[in-house]
Image (cartoon, helix red, strand yellow):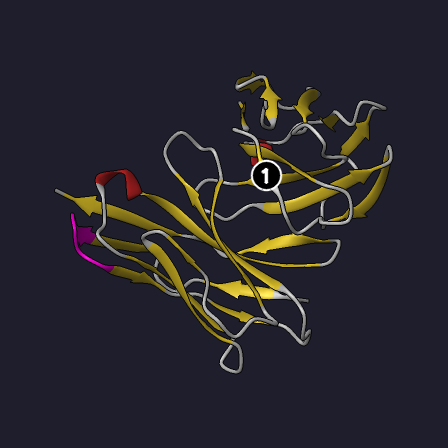
Amino acid sequence: DAGVTQSPTHLIKTRGQQVTLRCSPKSGHDTVSWYQQALGQGPQFIFQYYEEEERQRGNFPDRFSGHQFPNYSSELNVNALLLGDSALYLCASSPAGVTYEQYFGPGTRLTVT
Amino acid sequence: AQTVTQSQPEMSVQEAETVTLSCTYDTSENNYYLFWYKQPPSRQMILVIRQEAYKQQNATENRFSVNFQKAAKSFSLKISDSQLGDTAMYFCAFGRGNTPLVFGKGTRLSVIA
């Protein structure tokens, strides 16, 4: 049983560019949450997708957007990248109705130069 | 809003010894879940142990156990017989219903041979 997978593993972008990160949830899970983890900090909640809709959102600007596909996989898009967007981006999936039970992927390390 | 505080940025322990990591949280809710996650250098966030707030009995998973003090809003993690593979960042997290997890800033644990 494959766990949560994320791609790419690492990414380097320039300020002002746009980036798309991808996540495939654990088998049987239908809810996907995205977190940003700055160096030396705990993960911060960005948003959560369920049934292809954004169900909850943390305190992040509109430059951060997402999408969930019918197969429950998800994308995180960040526009107009800033140096401060450099972080580890974690995807977590949960089974229906048990959102607190989250299984994390290995993350994507984004570096903005 | 819930908050989670980990007051120990770094700790170290000798191999085979016991170490306790501290966590306090703030909430007005009565039903919730508390978690300890381990994040090794490989970056994958791994669930170590979970405690349901309605259970008085402290959770135990092999060498890992918690001391849950609901009235004091304290949730510490005890690692017995520490192993080199326990070296990692440890995050305390709060979860409830369909709300996203709230993480502390983490404690960096080093196990010394």
- Is A106 placed left or right of A57 in the picture? left
Q: Quadrant of the N terminus of chain B?
A: bottom right
Where does residue A87 sit, x and y in percent of width and height? 53, 34
Percent position of residue A36, x then y: 60, 39
Residue at 16 percent across and 50 percent down: it is: B16
Residue furthest to the bottom: B71
Q: Mainly helix, strand or loop, the magenta region?
A: loop
**Residues in magenta?**
B13-18
| Residue A21 visible to the viewer | yes
Looking at the picture, how far across and down is residue A110, in whole percent?
55, 25
The residue under the point 19% across, 53% down is B13
Can residue A16 be seen from the camera position used here?
Answer: no
* Left or right position of B79 against B92: left
Image: B92 above or below B46: below
Residue in the image at 63% along x and 48% along y = A101
Q: Chain of mark 1?
A: A
Q: Which residue is mark 1?
A: A103
The residue closer to the viewer here, A62 or A88, is A88
